[in-house]
Image (cartoon, rainbow, N blue to C red):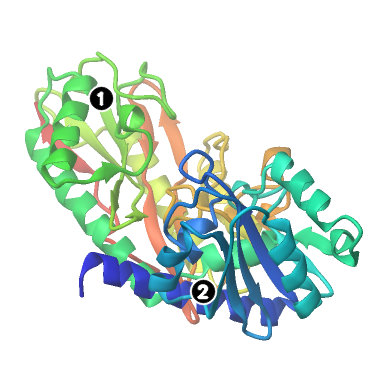
Amino acid sequence: MSAASAESALIQEKVAQAVGILREQNIDLWLTFVRETSAVRDPVLPYIYGHDVTWQSAFIFTRRGERIAILGHYDAETARRLGAYDEVITYHEAFSAPLRSLLQRLDPAQIAVNYSPNDAHADGLSHGMYLLLQEYLAGTPYAARLTSAERAAAALRGRKTPAEVARIRQAIATTEQIYAATFAFVRAGMTERAIGQFMHGQVTARGLETSWEWASCPAVNSGPDTPIGHAGPTDTVVEPGHLLHFDFGVRENGYTSDIQRVLYMLRPGEEDAPPPVRHGFATIVAAIQAAVAAMRPGVTGAEVDAVARQAVTAAGYPEYKYATGHHMGRACHDGGGVLGPHWERYGATPDYPLEAGHVYTVEPGLVVPGYGYMGIEEDVLVTETGTVFLGAPQTELLLLRG
């Protein structure tokens, strides 16, 4: 099967999934309203269409099973070829007339649209487009029937099909290959920047992209004084006695990976990492194992976060100032719930329950004073019976001699 055919098959699968979600959530109709998507793309669009549109367009699903697209006549043929929509309605001058006519025919009790205060990936309907939709529906009962598609969008992104999981596994396998090449390359005396350039070369040689912004993927953090977070490598020199931490992933076939690894640079005469480094490493491994053991359908993200956070603080470290994990898929930080605490910035998302088919990162971290950042990140799949690692987890501290 060609790449284009595989992508079309995946979109057809996700469109069918969307209809099932509407039935489950008792939503009559889900409307994704877009325009000029090469400039402003609704995060739902890659799942239900996979192409750009120019004119105002709507992609509509109902819980009765209708799958309908309204597009400008120049965009319509792409929708027909996709094969995911039973009906493709075209217009030339005015979008509002076919939209109103269709809604009168379907007469939905509620119309879910893509806005959300909690989830950026369910918030693709701009304020201007929302006002335009209200204008088009003025004088009809449907303007008052608009509601948030937040939970529907979260379910569509979060419930990975076997084809999606296979793509994620491939991105993870590629990431592990690049890590192996990098660890063979690293030596004391190199800069973070040189190591990052080597990893970029590995990505480019495979014709791929990084999971997030090129300049900050990978993160390479050597020793106690380098900045930690969403920043790129610096000119800091890797020295014996440093922890060397990486955060990296690739985008392959439209899906991402997100993996952190850590190693210790041995000092002259050392045969093992010193006790503080060993203690920090053991703490993070234990926190990840505890979190994964707690992950099963029905458990909330906040409950999983509390387990991992407790493992770190009970070992004598301050709590980390971020969520334990996030969804991963077409976006590295994908939509839906987070494995996080009840902090203002996470809104309601820590209370979303885990479901079979969800793919999360698990990434607790801590600082080992005098040595650097100790962070490991694993990518895992929630199943009906528990949670499995999608790659080979790091359970041993890699030791490198300069």
Examine the image and state in which quarter residue 60 appears.
Answer: bottom right
**x, y percent for residue 270:** 14, 29
Is residue 55 among the parts visible in the rendering?
A: yes
Q: Is residue 393 left or right of residue 336?
A: left
Which circle's residue, 1 or 2, is located before the other in the chain? 2
Q: Secondary structure at mark 1?
A: loop
**377 or 151: nearer the viewer:** 151
Does the image show residue 266? no
Q: Mark 1 or 2, which is nearer the eye?
A: 2
The kind of secondary structure element at disc 2 is helix
Above or below, 237 against 402 in this view is above
Quadrant in the picture for residue 300: bottom right
- Report crowding for label 2: few under 14, some 14 to 19, many 20 or more residues within 10 A (C-alpha): many
User: Image check: 5 left or right of 344?
Assistant: left
**Residue at the limit of the structure toward the front, as seen here:** 93
x, y percent for residue 308: 53, 52
Quarter of the figure that contains the N terminus: bottom left
* Residue plotted at (13% across, 34% down): 201
Q: How many numbered callouts? A: 2
In the rendered image, residue 58, in percent from the top left (x then y), is placed at 62, 61
Q: Nearer the viewer, residue 362 or 48?
A: 48
Residue at image position (30%, 22%) is 223
Disc 1 marks which amino acid?
A: His
Marker disc for residue 242? 1
Residue 104 in the figure: left or right of residue 218: right
Which of the pair 7/259 is nearer the observer? 7
Viewer-closest of 352 and 30: 30
Q: Quadrant of the C terminus?
A: top left
Indicate which disc residue 132 carries: none
Residue appearing at x 53%, y 80% in the figure:
86
Q: Which residue is mark 2?
A: 15
